[in-house]
Image (cartoon, helix red, strand yellow):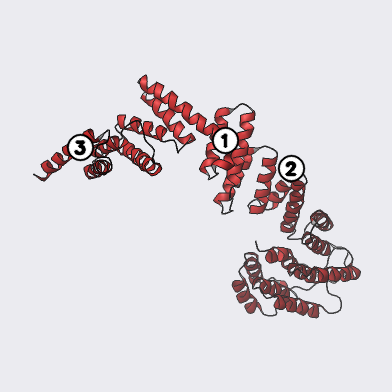
Amino acid sequence: MDPVRSSLLPLFFLACAAASCGEPGSSAEPRSSPAGGGLDPRRTEVLRALDAGLPDAAWTLLDQLGDSLGIDGPLLRARAALLDGDAVGALRAVEEAKRLAGDAPPAEILATEVEVLVSLDRLDSAREKLREAWKRVGRVAALERARGLLLIRTPGGGREGLTALEAARELDPELPFLDHPTAQAHHLVGRAALASGAPDQALAHALLARAFDGEDLDFRELEAEARAALLDFDAALALYRDLLRDGRPMGETLALMHQRFGTLLLMEKRREEALDQYVAARDLGLSREALGFGATLLAEEAVRQIDLGIGRWSADDLAGARAAFERATACDPANLEARHHLGLCLFREQDFGGAAAVWSEVRREALAAGASLPDPVHLNLARALRLSGDPEGARGVLSEYLDREPEGEWSEESRDLLLALEVEALARED
């Protein structure tokens, strides 16, 4: 929510309270209701429009209502002006409300003036107006709310601001729209607690802030950070994933959380679970260098799984071999041997398209890196393409190999297969 809008959220609704402009402990006289003693339903629509950040809709309704709202009118127009970015217009509207109120403006107008100045970051002027308001009506609920808003916009004022907002609620439990600034204050106090090394306190304030607004991204992120600091990584990661889904840029944060969780699990001798966390961190873009020891463990695990898979292949345990090669590939996607063996499993399972896809990438990366493989990947790829219904692709792979290595180790077999493909092509033409 826009900070200007959020800081003014309480004051306009309070100014439009149906009963009176008086505060507990205030000498202000009750404000009369609109003509006929009823409340125009359009007033509620104005409030909803302003609350939703829709100044155009609010202006349309305010124009229809004209002067029927009394003091409420200029106060609502002040908020609409702020939503439009018209600070001068907002202040002018507050002055109009003061003029209508005469020599003894009620507490809501005085609080509104302070809060408008706060929203415009005119904090010194807001402090002066607040002191003047105290002299007029005393420390009533509306002014305590205004003081709380002023303090939470002042660097280092979060805790004192929270105290003021809680005092406002105690003075008048029915005082509207204290929730959002109170939640903001809890967020500020929680941030300070986290920075000072008190994550348990930070978590408590994060949860209190979320009790007022459970969807606010800042409050949810504070909870995630506090839980991570308390080593509750399962909960922290769930929160971070939700934040990412809801549009909060995470950068490397989520990946680093997986890395930290992996290290914790490793210390607890939960190696397999730790590897899963390192895989997740790597898949989220964490570099090999940033992954550190985790990258070494993943490479070692890939080699171990390859050996395991070869053993299962030799024992004719195809499902077990495939699972091992898939795990090896997940641990180290750059390991061409693991992926090549996975292709063999897919081919033997007659998933020729899947095998071709795997071997195509292995061949491409091996050529790019100048790496050699113990098996003729190009021949395997050509056979998989042929059986998957792509003979032209197979012929292209074989021709490329023969152009590159006409006297290579696999040239004779490659020519034989290429000839067979060409005979098949001629047969199809006939």
Query: Three-letter amino acid code at disc 2?
Result: Pro
User: Label 1, label 2: how many angstroms apart (C-alpha)?
Assistant: 26 Å
Give coordinates of residue 400: x percent, y percent.
26, 44
Residue drawn 41% across and 36% down? 336
Query: Three-letter amino acid code at disc 1?
Result: Gly
Does the rendering let one see residue 279? yes
Question: In this rendering, is residue 143 above or below 199?
Answer: below
Q: Residues within 10 Å of mark 2 (few under 14, many from 20)?
A: many
Query: In front of the other: label 1 or label 2?
Result: 1
Q: Under tag 2, what secondary structure?
A: helix
Question: In this rendering, is residue 244 above or below 72?
Answer: above
Which numbered disc flags the more N-terminal residue, 3 or 2?
2
Q: Residues within 10 Å of mark 1 (few under 14, many from 20)?
A: many
Identify which residue, 86 or 195, lies in the foreground: 195
Give coordinates of residue 33: x percent, y percent.
75, 73
Give the residue number, with chain letter if any, for mark 1. Answer: 294
Give the residue number, with chain letter if any, for mark 3. Answer: 415
Give coordinates of residue 257: x percent, y percent.
61, 41
Q: Residues within 10 Å of mark 3 (few under 14, many from 20)?
A: some
Does the rendering let one see residue 70? no
User: Label 3, label 1: how many angstroms apart (C-alpha)?
Assistant: 45 Å
Give the residue number, with chain letter if any, for mark 2. Answer: 199
Is 180 on the left-hand or right-hand side of 262? right
Is 113 on the left-hand or right-hand side of 337? right
Residue drawn 45% across and 32% down? 328
Q: How many marks?
A: 3
Which numbered disc flags the more N-terminal residue, 1 or 2?
2
Is 267 on the left-hand or right-hand side of 200? left
Question: In this rendering, is residue 125 above or below 352?
Answer: below
Query: Three-letter amino acid code at disc 3?
Result: Arg
Query: In front of the other: label 3 or label 2?
Result: 3
Farthest residue in the right direction?
A: 135
